[in-house]
Image (cartoon, rainbow, N blue to C red):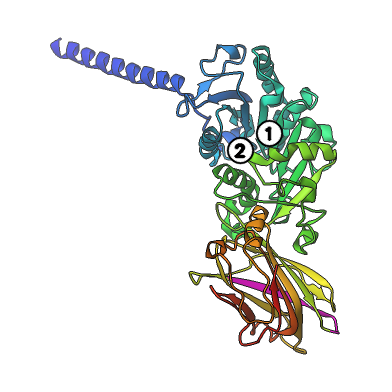
């Protein structure tokens, strides 16, 4: 009898403990709702659409508040006088939380005092049947409209509404914008989904009329994304496909399929870190950009060329005045922060016969670091007394340049060896045009001397400069199938031409 009573007491305590643990966990879950984390099992069995909006502000950065669908104004942290940013994910074939979500949350809140709303529609996006997720997009947009309407009733403004959509999420943002007849403040589309959206009407996908300002980043336009321009401005890093650092073959597994597509997100995150500005150049095509034909941004003066990412809306006014979409191209490095520092090489040659080939540029700084251009320019045609522009790009920025080396090559293993005769050349930094005047004021014209000095040693910073060598002598660059390269070097006291004397050298 005593033994039986003891067992009952133990079981009662155990039940009480289990209930207590469950209550604590449930209470914690209620206090800090999290993104719905599913797995491949849910994708195989399918999920019914459920949408939750998780609000983060600087007051609750580490613990979200779930907004009540029919009573948004009951929120403790929502401030309708502030800018509201919605982040909308895309198709989730495995059900896991997006790998980039936590970092985006932290960076957005550190960049600006905003209402940050994570739109969690993982139940509805997690399925092996892609068409089901596509069908759910308009349903999600309808739900979001309900939330936005309540915010507007509480004093929010459409001007301050900003939606960032990834893949299918970009089209969801577009559908919401359509419901407000394009009066939504801004939409950013991060590689909007291509499958089932390639040949549809503008009202059936993201379009530049869906918000006051629509910027789009295309990184996988030949597979999971869209090539067609959709926004006020469309950015095409590395031509919009085959991103550097992404695996080129199927042997890398799932990473092969998602790397290019996700690069748009990581480029956007890089813009929030502000370690460098990724500058883009408006152009009709990637090919024209590679030929150096699209490096002028006079239409945006006194501003520079547009920058990618969160701060792209600084160019909103000029782009709206154009009243036509703009495509912008640029190259990136293969890893975060993905910055490429561009220079324009302007060359005039004097060969009587036409020469065709490639020029590689190497830059050496005072620390002895030598970096070769990473932009693979197309074959260039050199004609007598004709100026040729060649775009070059480097993975690092240069504060002080010690040496510039050029190599001319036809990239042929057999055949005649040519000499490319240079009459004059100019190397211009494109990323920091505002630095140009600093250098120009520090240079002076010297003639008939082998020495070119600097009036002020503090002005030796070759950052954003125009370097223009005008030579009244004829300097030869030889082609020995990529073997030979001639250099111009700068020291504190002189420009050297590897033993050739300069009859007249002027730096502008």
In the rendered view, would you say 143 is above or below 392?
above
Mark 1 or 2, nearer chain start: 2
Residue 330 x/y as whole percent: 70, 55
Residue under the point 63% across and 55% down: 435
Label 1 packing within 10 angstroms: few (<14), some (14-19), many (20+): many
Q: Is residue 355 magenta?
A: yes
Q: How far apart are marks 1 and 2 (CA)?
A: 9 Å
Residue under the point 81% across and 71% down: 387
- Please give the range of residues in magenta: 352-363
Residue under the point 65% across and 40% down: 311
Asked which secondary structure carries label 1, the reply is helix
Q: Give the farthest residue toward the left.
A: 2
Q: Are marks 1 and 2 in contact (CB under 8 Å)?
A: yes
Which label was assigned to residue 133?
1
Residue 301 in sight: yes
Which quadrant would residue 129 be assigned to in this image?
top right
Label 2 packing within 10 angstroms: few (<14), some (14-19), many (20+): many
Residue under pointer 2:
92
Is 127 left or right of 183, judged from the image as shown? left
Give the camera-side residue of 175 and 45.
175
In the rendered view, would you say 289 is above or below 424?
above
Give the camera-side residue of 424 and 212.
424
Residue 470 x/y as whole percent: 73, 75
Q: Main secondary structure of the magenta part?
A: strand
Residue 249 in sight: no
Which quadrant would residue 399 be assigned to in this image?
bottom right
Residue under the point 81% across and 32% down: 209
């Amino acid at each position: 009898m005593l033994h039986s009573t003891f067992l009952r007491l133990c079981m009662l305590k155990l039940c009480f403990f289990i209930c207590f643990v469950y209550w604590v966990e449930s209470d914690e879950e209620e206090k800090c709702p999290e993104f719905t984390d599913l797995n491949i099992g849910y994708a195989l069995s399918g999920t019914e659409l459920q949408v939750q909006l998780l609000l983060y502000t600087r007051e609750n950065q580490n613990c979200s508040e779930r907004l009540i669908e029919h009573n948004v104004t009951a929120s403790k942290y929502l401030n309708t006088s502030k800018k509201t940013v919605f982040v909308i994910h895309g198709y989730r074939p495995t059900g896991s939380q997006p790998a980039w979500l936590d970092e985006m949350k932290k960076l957005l809140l550190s960049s600006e005092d905003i209402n940050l709303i994570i739109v969690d529609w993982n139940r509805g996006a997690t399925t092996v049947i892609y068409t089901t997720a596509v069908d759910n997009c308009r349903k999600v947009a309808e739900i979001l409209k309900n939330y936005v309407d309540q915010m507007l009733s509480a004093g929010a403004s459409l001007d301050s509404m900003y939606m960032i959509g990834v893949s299918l999420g970009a089209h969801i943002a577009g559908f919401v914008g359509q419901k407000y007849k394009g009066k939504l403040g801004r939409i950013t589309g991060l590689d909007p989904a291509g499958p089932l959206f390639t040949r549809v009407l503008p009202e059936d996908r993201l379009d530049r009329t869906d918000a006051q300002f629509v910027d789009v980043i295309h990184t996988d336009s030949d597979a999971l994304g869209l090539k067609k321009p959709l926004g006020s401005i469309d950015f095409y890093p590395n031509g919009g496909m085959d991103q550097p650092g992404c695996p080129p073959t199927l042997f890398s597994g799932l990473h092969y399929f998602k790397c290019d597509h996700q690069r748009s997100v990581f480029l956007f995150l890089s813009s929030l870190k502000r370690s460098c500005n990724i500058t883009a150049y408006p152009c009709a095509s990637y090919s024209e950009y590679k030929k150096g034909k699209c490096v002028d941004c006079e239409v945006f003066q006194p501003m520079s060329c547009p920058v990618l990412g969160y701060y792209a809306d600084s160019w909103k006014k000029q782009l709206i005045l154009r009243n036509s979409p703009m495509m912008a191209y640029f190259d990136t490095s293969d890893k975060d922060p993905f910055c490429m520092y561009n220079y324009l090489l302007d060359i005039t040659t004097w060969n009587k016969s036409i020469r065709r080939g490639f020029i590689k540029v190497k830059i050496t700084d005072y620390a002895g670091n030598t970096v070769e251009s990473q932009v693979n320019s197309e074959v260039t045609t050199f004609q007598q007394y004709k100026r040729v522009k060649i775009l070059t790009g480097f993975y690092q920025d240069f504060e002080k340049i010690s040496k510039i080396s050029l190599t001319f090559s036809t990239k042929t293993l057999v055949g005649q060896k040519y000499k490319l005769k240079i009459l004059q050349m100019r190397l211009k930094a494109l990323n920091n045009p505002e630095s140009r005047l600093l250098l120009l004021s520090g240079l002076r014209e010297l003639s008939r001397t082998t020495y070119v000095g600097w009036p002020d040693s503090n002005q030796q910073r070759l950052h954003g400069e125009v370097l223009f060598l005008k030579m009244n002598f004829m300097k030869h660059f030889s082609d020995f199938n990529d073997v030979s390269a001639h250099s111009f070097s700068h020291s504190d006291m002189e420009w050297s031409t590897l033993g050739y004397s300069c009859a007249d050298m002027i730096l502008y």
